[in-house]
Amino acid sequence: METRLEKKLIKRLQAREPKAFDQLVLLFQGQVYNFVFRMLGSTAEAEDLAQEVFISVFKHIDAFRGESSLATWIYRIAANHVKNRRKYHGRRPYDRPLQSASALDPGRSGEGAVLGAGQVSRPDEMVEGLQLERILQEAILALDEEHRMVLVLRDVQNESYDVISEVTGLPLGTVKSRLHRARLALKEALEERTR
Amino acid sequence: MDHERAQSLFMSYHDAELPAREVEALEAHLAQCTECSLAWQGYKAAVEEISGLLKVTPAPDFSKRVQQAIGRRSRGRFFSESSDSGGLGIAIVSVILVLVFALLYLLIATSGEVKVVDPGASSDPKGAASP
């Protein structure tokens, strides 16, 4: 559902106001970037795809009818881009450059890399944290796309079941059963790797 | 409650969406079943770990680069001129161009009139009187 502020922003976007586009990108870039990064496992891919997502948003803003919230609509576009990118890589040999977020540039904070959810002060804790981060990202990428999408939306992006259902086009029951299976698979993968 | 039933309730239990009676039954089962208790601990830990993953953000100039990409792809036609200060600049340039063209037109028209009048009047004064 659209809020009044959202309606205003959409009107300005449809009038092609550069400042409105800037506002939109700033508002949703973190959400889109983190989502595509967790789905693909590469910052280069995430950077490129997040850009494509916003270009699509701008291209199709006139077609936005307000049947869902702007955030959900943007997620849907991002999800389609991720699917298409995966299909593209499926047709071509692609050596996925797996990256954990913190392995990108652990010394840098925020800029093009990471904002720590939990800060670590001791080096041994940091190394442990990096290893866990990598293990988790590998485990996420090992899931099939349908399960990964639901897991990332719910547990990484913290979205509600209703939003996930709208983004994926799946009934609520299917979303929940997929999430349960994804969590179980992740639990197995984590237990196997830490054994 | 059997193991399979207990483990199928983990998600609703974690999301606090389980009715009180089922919570009670599940907790009673977990208290006496090591296998399910360990499975629950693992499930909870996995969800917590993944929820605590670092949030990745793009570089600060990301928004600028998106605008540049849109500008490139639409050959600068995407954003409206009216809302941009550049629009005013283009309007001023247009007015100046119109004025310059009007001035040029007047100059050419004026010089044309002189040419029509001058040949007969000044270059051949004799010829004018000859027939």
Image (cartoon, coloured by chain):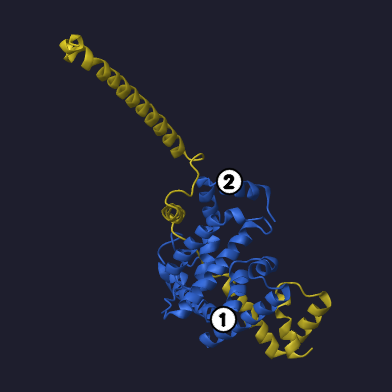
Chain colours: A blue, B yellow
Amino acid type, mark 2: Arg
Question: Callout 1: few (<14), some (14-19), or many (20+) C-alpha neighbours within 10 Å?
Answer: few
In this picture, is A42 found above or below B6? above
Locate residue A168, reporting x and y percent: 64, 70
The quadrant holding residue A169 is: bottom right
Residue sitting at x 61%, y 69%: A153
Give the numbered dot on residue B47. Answer: none
- In this rendered view, identify the residue nearer to me: A76 or B96: B96
Observer-side mark, 2 or 1, equals 2
Give the numbered dot on residue A12. Answer: 2
The mark nearer the N terminus, 2 or 1, is: 2
- In this rendered view, identify the residue nearer to me: A159 or A82: A82
Q: Is residue A3 left or right of residue A74?
A: right
Locate residue A105, reporting x and y percent: 40, 67
Q: Is residue B118 left or right of residue B57?
A: left
| Mark 2 secondary-structure assignment | helix
- How many discs appear? 2
Locate residue A131, reporting x and y percent: 46, 77
Residue sitting at x 42%, y 51%: B75
Residue sitting at x 69%, y 85%: B37
Residue sitting at x 58%, y 54%: A61
Question: Callout 2: few (<14), some (14-19), or many (20+) C-alpha neighbours within 10 Å?
Answer: some
Q: Residue furthest right?
A: B21
Amino acid type, mark 1: Asp
Q: Is residue A29 visible?
A: yes
Say which chain tag 2 marks. Answer: A
The quadrant holding residue B60 is: bottom left
- Can you identify the residue that label 1 sits on? A144
| Mark 1 secondary-structure assignment | loop
